[in-house]
Image: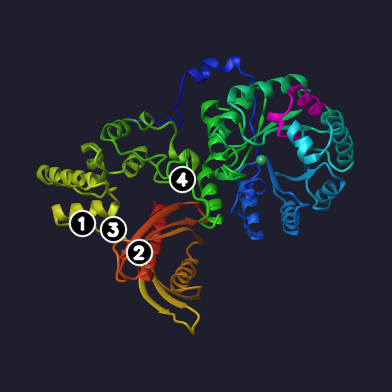
C-alpha cells in the first residue's frame, strides 16, 4: 500500500523546536503589488492589480500591500479600488515619514498604514541628510499623526540590517511608544546571513512588547531571502513579507511559495493560507508578467522540474512510496495532475536515458499498452538511444517510438475537436479568425462557432477559440512559446502553451507541431482544452 502522507521532512526539525522562538501562527504580508511591481521590467495594469488582489485574498494572505499611493496617480487608484473591493485581507498602503504620503493613504481609504524611514548611517547621511536624532523625532511625529487616522500602524526601519543594532531597537521602540502596532525588520539590500539576521530579530523581540507583531522583509541578493525569513521566524518573528514568485527589486524578495511551504512543511506552523491555491496563484501572476519574468524550470515547488523524476532507481522507489524522493505531494500546493499517488508518479516521471524499466512500464500502462517482452526491450533501447543524443523524451517522442515498435497507438478520447478554421489576414485587413469547434456534451457533440479579430492571425484564432469554449468554461492562456524545429520558411513550428481553467484552477500544458504556425497554435490550444475537460470529467 502506498502511504498517503502529504509531508515527510527531517525528524531533526522536531528535535530542535524547543530551542527556537517559533510563533503560534505564521502571518503573511504580500508585497507583490508594491515591491513586486518594482521588479525591473514589470508593471501591472489596473485590472491585473485588482485581479491579483482578489487572488491573494482567496489564497488567504493576511495583509496585502496594495501600493505606495503618493508615488503616482495609478498607484493611488489601485490602492483606493483594492481597498473598496471588500476583501477579507487587510489592505495596507506605504508611506514615507511625510505628512503628504500619510494623507494619500488616508485619502485612498486603506485599512492600515505602513510607514518607513531609513536607520542605517549610510541612508541617513547620504539619502535623508538627517542626523539620527532627527530620524527619531520624525518617527515620533509621523507615527503620532498617523495614529489619529489608523488603528493599525506598521513601522519599518529601512536598511535595518546595516543599521547600528542599538539604534534600530531605539527606532522601533520609539515607533511602538507612539502608536505603531507592528514592526517590520527589512534586510533591504540583502546583506546578511541567516544566523546574523536571527540575532537581530531576537534582540528586537526581547526589547519590544510581546503584543507587537514582528514582520521580516528579506531580499535575495545572495540567494538567502527565504533562509533569512525562516531564521527570523526561529527568533520571534511571526509575519513574513513576501512576493509571489519572489518578484521584487534587483534579485527579488523572499518568495511566498518557498517561505509559506517551508514554514508549513518544516515547522507545521498554523496559517490562514489555502496551500492548494499556491501554484495556480503563481501561474496567474506569471501570466501578468507578460513573458518578462518566468517561473524557472528548477524553481523550488512551482518550477517544471520540481516534481519530475528521470532516474530509474528513483522512479521505482516513488511508485512504492512517492515520499521516497519528494518532500510533499504536488497536490498540496495545487499542482493538479490526478487523484492517486501512483498516477501522479507515472505522469511526472520524465522518460530519459536514466529511466529504468519501472518508469517505462508505468508509462505504457498509463496509455493502456501491453507490449511483448521483445517489444518492451526494443522500446527501452530506443528511448535510451534518443536520450543519449541529448534529447528529452517528450510525450510525442515516446508515442512515436511506441508506434514504430508496436505499430499501433492508443485512441485517446477527444472532448474538443477543431472542425473548421478560416483566417483572414494581410496588410490592409484586420486579422480575423472564425472557428467552429465540436465539443462533447453528454456523449453527443455540439457545434460552437465564434469569430474574433486580433493583432495577428494567431492572436485572432486563439481569441476565437477561447470565445467558442466560453459556454463550457472560461479559460486563460498563461503562456505561449514557439520554436522552429527546422530552418527555412517551411520549418515546422512547435508551439507550447499553458492554459488555465478559471473555474477549477486546473492548469495544463500542451504542444503541437505543424508547418503552419496558426495551425500549431490552434492545435495546441485545442489539445489543452481537451486535457482540461478530461481532468474535470475525472
Ligand atoms: Mn524591499
In the rendered image, residue 290, in percent from the top left (x then y), is placed at 54, 58
What residue sits right under mark 1 in the picture?
409
Observer-side mark, 1 or 2, equals: 1
What residue sits right under mark 3 in the picture?
412
Residue at 48% across, 17% down: 12
Instruction: Indicate whether residue 166 is drawn in magenta.
Output: yes
* Lower sequence index among marks 4 and 2: 4
What residue sits right under mark 4 in the picture?
296
Mark pair 4, 2: CA separation: 40 Å
Q: Which mark is residue 443?
A: 2
Specify the segment rendered in magenta. Answer: 154-173
Q: Is residue 203 above or below residue 356?
A: above
Observer-side mark, 4 or 3, equals: 4
Mark 4: few/some/many CA within 10 Å (<14, 14-19, 20+): few
Mark pair 4, 1: CA separation: 33 Å
* Lower sequence index among marks 1 and 2: 1
Contact, mark 4 vs mark 2 (Cβ under 8 Å) = no
Q: Is residue 533 left or right of residue 180?
A: left
Contact, mark 4 vs mark 3 (Cβ under 8 Å) = no
| Quarter of the rendering containing residue 388 | top left
Disc 3 CB within 8 Å of nearest ligand 1 atom: no
Q: Nearer the viewer, residue 470 or 226?
A: 226
Observer-side mark, 4 or 1, equals: 4
Secondary element at image label 4: loop
Residue 151 is at least partly visible in this image: yes
Mark 3: few/some/many CA within 10 Å (<14, 14-19, 20+): few
Observer-side mark, 1 or 3, equals: 1
Q: Is residue 285 above or below residue 323?
A: below
Q: Is residue 432 left or right of residue 361?
A: right
Amino acid at each position: 500500500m502506498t502511504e498517503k502522507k502529504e509531508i515527510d521532512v527531517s525528524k531533526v526539525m522536531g528535535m530542535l523546536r524547543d530551542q527556537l522562538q517559533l510563533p503560534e501562527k505564521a502571518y503573511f504580508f504580500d508585497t507583490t503589488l508594491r515591491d513586486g511591481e518594482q521588479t525591473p521590467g514589470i508593471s501591472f495594469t489596473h485590472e491585473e492589480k485588482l485581479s491579483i488582489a482578489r487572488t491573494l485574498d482567496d489564497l488567504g494572505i493576511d495583509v496585502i500591500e496594495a501600493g505606495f499611493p503618493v508615488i503616482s496617480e495609478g498607484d493611488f487608484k489601485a490602492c483606493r479600488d483594492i481597498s473598496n473591493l471588500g476583501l477579507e485581507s487587510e489592505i495596507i498602503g506605504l508611506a514615507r515619514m511625510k505628512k503628504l504620503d500619510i494623507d494619500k493613504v488616508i485619502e485612498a481609504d486603506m485599512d492600515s498604514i505602513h510607514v518607513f524611514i531609513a536607520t542605517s548611517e549610510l541612508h541617513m547621511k547620504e539619502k535623508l541628510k538627517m542626523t539620527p536624532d532627527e530620524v527619531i523625532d520624525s518617527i515620533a511625529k509621523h507615527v503620532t499623526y498617523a495614529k489619529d487616522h489608523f488603528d493599525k500602524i506598521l513601522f519599518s526601519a529601512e536598511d535595518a540590517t546595516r543599521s547600528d543594532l542599538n539604534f534600530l531597537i531605539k527606532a522601533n521602540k520609539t515607533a511602538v511608544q507612539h502608536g505603531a502596532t507592528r514592526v517590520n525588520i527589512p534586510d533591504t539590500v540583502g546583506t546578511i546571513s541567516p544566523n546574523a539576521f536571527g540575532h537581530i530579530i531576537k534582540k528586537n523581540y526581547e526589547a519590544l512588547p510581546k503584543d507587537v507583531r514582528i514582520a521580516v522583509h528579506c531580499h535575495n541578493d545572495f540567494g538567502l531571502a527565504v533562509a533569512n525569513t525562516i531564521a527570523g521566524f526561529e527568533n520571534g518573528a511571526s509575519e513574513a513579507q513576501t512576493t509571489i514568485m519572489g518578484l521584487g527589486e534587483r534579485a527579488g524578495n523572499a518568495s511566498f511559495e518557498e517561505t509559506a511551504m517551508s514554514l508549513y512543511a518544516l515547522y507545521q506552523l498554523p496559517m490562514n493560507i489555502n496551500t492548494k491555491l499556491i501554484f495556480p496563484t503563481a501561474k496567474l501572476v506569471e501570466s501578468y508578467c507578460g513573458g518578462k519574468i518566468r517561473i524557472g524550470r528548477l524553481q523550488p515547488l512551482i518550477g517544471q522540474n520540481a516534481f519530475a523524476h528521470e532516474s530509474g532507481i528513483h522512479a521505482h522507489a516513488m511508485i512504492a512510496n512517492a515520499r521516497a524522493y519528494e518532500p510533499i505531494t504536488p497536490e498540496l500546493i495545487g499542482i493538479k495532475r490526478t487523484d492517486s499517488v501512483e498516477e501522479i508518479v507515472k505522469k511526472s516521471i520524465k522518460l530519459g536515458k536514466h529511466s529504468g524499466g519501472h518508469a517505462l512500464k508505468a508509462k505504457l500502462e498509463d496509455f493502456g499498452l501491453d507490449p511483448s517482452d521483445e517489444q518492451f526491450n526494443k522500446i527501452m533501447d530506443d528511448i535510451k538511444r534518443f536520450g543519449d543524443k541529448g534529447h528529452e523524451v517528450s510525450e510525442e517522442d515516446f508515442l512515436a517510438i511506441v508506434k514504430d515498435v508496436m505499430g499501433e497507438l492508443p485512441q485517446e478520447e477527444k472532448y474538443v475537436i477543431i472542425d473548421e478554421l478560416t483566417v483572414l489576414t494581410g496588410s490592409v485587413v484586420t486579422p480575423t479568425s472564425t472557428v467552429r469547434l465540436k465539443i462533447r456534451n453528454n456523449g453527443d457533440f455540439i457545434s460552437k462557432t465564434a469569430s474574433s479579430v486580433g493583432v495577428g492571425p494567431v492572436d485572432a484564432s486563439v481569441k476565437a477559440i477561447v470565445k467558442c469554449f466560453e459556454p463550457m468554461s472560461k479559460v486563460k492562456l498563461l503562456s505561449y512559446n514557439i520554436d522552429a524545429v527546422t530552418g527555412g520558411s517551411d520549418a515546422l513550428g512547435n508551439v507550447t502553451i499553458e492554459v488555465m481553467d478559471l473555474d477549477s484552477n486546473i492548469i495544463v500544458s500542451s504542444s503541437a507541431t505543424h508547418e503552419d504556425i496558426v495551425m500549431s497554435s490552434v492545435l495546441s490550444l485545442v489539445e489543452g482544452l481537451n486535457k482540461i475537460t478530461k481532468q474535470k470529467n475525472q
